[in-house]
Every structure is written in C-alpha cells, then in structure tokens.
Amino acid sequence: MLLTDFNSADAGEVRPVLTACLAVPRWVDTILGHRPYEDLDALRAAADLPLSSEEIRQAMAAHPRIGEKPASGWARSEQSGVDNADAFAAANAEYEAKFGHVYLVCASGRSGEELLKILRERLDNDPATELAVAGRELLKIAELRLAKAVTA
C-alpha cells in the first residue's frame, strides 16, 4: 500500500494491515490516530511506541515459534534461514519452561545457527529483562513488516 493510500484509506481498511504488523490494539490505534504521515520516516517514528508487559505478552501469542515453519505470511519469509528445527524444538521447550512464553527474536536476515545462539544467551536473563528484550524485538519485527506493508 502506498503511503498516500495509507493516509487516506478508511481506518477499517488499514487496521488489519497494521494488526498483521503488530497485534497490539493501542499500537494500531496510535498509528491510525496520527495519520496523515508526511513521509515514511514519520510513520516509522510513530511505530516506535513503548509496549507494556501485557501488550508484549499479547503480541507474542500471535507469533509462531522460531524453528516451526508457519504456513504462510511474513513469518514464513522472516524465518526462511532457520533450518535446524530439531535443535530449536529442545531450546524452545527450555526457554518456554523458564519464561512462560515463546522465544521472540527479529529473525529476518539471520541464520538458524545465529538465532539458536541468541536464544541460548537469552536463557541467562531474568524474566523481567527477557520480557523487555522480547518487546524490543517485537518492535523491530513490526517496523520490518510496516516497511513491507506501506511504501513510498
């Protein structure tokens, strides 16, 4: 969708596009509420919105596990470098047992080996730190998806 179309489209048309970028209603509403955007930099700046712990948990629930190939959509291409699903299954189980949520990382452009290394390093975090790290990763993913969804 072109930025000009994004700016002028009915909110009902744009909401699903934004929700696919990040499933956090306040984030979607904030971006919608600040239209029109002068340029893509202004849109990206509006998208860099701190998320609450509850919003992070809510958004993580909409993400597939790293290493489990989603059927379609952005997550499929974002995880295209992950080819070590068996190693991820064990690491994901350990991570989820410790933190109570899926491992979330901006996977785009990273190898499966790199993503697994990051997961293992993050196992050393305490739960509050890890939730904050996951929130930052969510915003990175949202920015990448937003850049694909809205263009100049």
Image: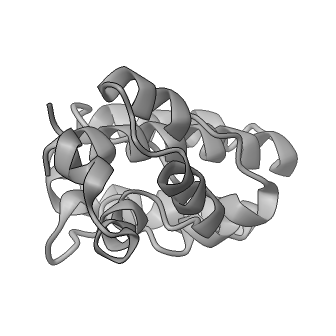
Residue 114 percent coordinates (x, y): 34, 31
Question: In the rendered view, would you say 45 is above or below 64?
Answer: above
Query: Who's the residue at 21% across and 31% down the image?
Result: 109
Residue 99 percent coordinates (x, y): 74, 61
Query: Who's the residue at 50% across and 67% down the image?
Result: 23
Which quadrant holds the C terminus? top left
Query: Who's the residue at 83% across and 51% down the image?
Result: 127
Q: Quadrant of residue 116?
A: top left
Residue 139 percent coordinates (x, y): 52, 41
Q: Quadrant of residue 74?
A: bottom left
User: Relative to 144, is 3 on the left or the right?
Assistant: left
User: Relative to 19, is 23 on the left or the right?
Assistant: right
User: Relative to 98, is 33 on the left or the right?
Assistant: left
Question: In the rendered view, would you say 40 is above or below 87?
Answer: above
Query: Who's the residue at 26% across and 32% down the image?
Result: 110
Residue 126 percent coordinates (x, y): 84, 43
